[in-house]
Amino acid sequence: MNKVLVLAVAILLSSLFATAQTAAGKIPHKVIMQLSSSDTLAWKGLMNNIKNLKAFWGDSVVIEVVAHGPGIGFLMKEKTTQLDRIIDFKSKGVVFAGCENTLLERKISKESIIQEAGFVKSAVVEIILKQEQGWSYIKGGF
């Protein structure tokens, strides 16, 4: 009887451990990326970082890019050099957002922003909220 009980407990613990590992493997990595640079080489570098994250983790990574300050040009129709890559990454689930505070401060209309991008009230607040929810933070640029 003791052997049966020990065996049952061992099987139960093994099952729980395997379930925990499987569940942990399905939890996506969450990355918030800040872009506050007008340097087009920084924009290209940020996009390469996204490419590398997606190549390594595939669908198990969630990425949000928040552009503000001088980095807002990254999302502007007339200034971006990365539209094709933004379209491609958006189709893979990457979220791009412009800071409404920046738009207001710089007198930029929402219509000037590419349609692939959304908006957040404050980029800095968005970054803080994501970090408080366990997201990893990456500063784009040099």
Image (cartoon, grey):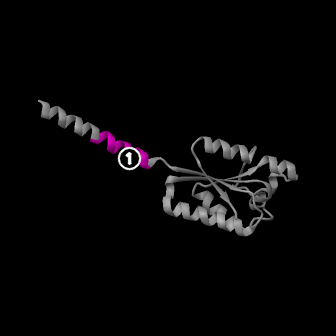
Residues in magenta, as a range:
14-25
Q: Residue at x 60, y 61 (%)?
A: 50
Residue 95 covered by magenta stretch: no
User: Split into 4 quadrants, where in the image is the N terminus?
Assistant: top left
As drawn, the residue found furthest toward the left would be 1
Quarter where residue 93 is shown: bottom right
Q: Is residue 43 left or right of residue 134?
A: right
Give the residue type that dot 1 points to: Thr
As drawn, the residue found furthest toward the right would be 107
Q: Residue at x 67, y 47 (%)?
A: 127
Q: Is residue 61 left or right of residue 11?
A: right
Q: Is residue 82 visible?
A: no
Residue 79 locus on image (x, y percent):
79, 65
Which of 82 and 15 lies nearest the eye of the viewer?
Answer: 15
Residue 138 locus on image (x, y percent):
63, 55
SS at circle 1: helix
User: Split into 4 quadrants, where in the image is the C terminus?
Assistant: bottom right
Which of 110 and 129 lies nearest the eye of the viewer?
Answer: 129
Q: Residue at x 70, y 63 (%)?
A: 141
Residue 19 covered by magenta stretch: yes
Q: Is residue 41 visible?
A: yes
Q: Residue at x 62, y 45 (%)?
A: 131
Q: Residues within 10 Å of mark 1 (few under 14, many from 20)?
A: few
Question: What residue does disc 1 label?
Answer: 22
Residue 17 locus on image (x, y percent):
33, 42
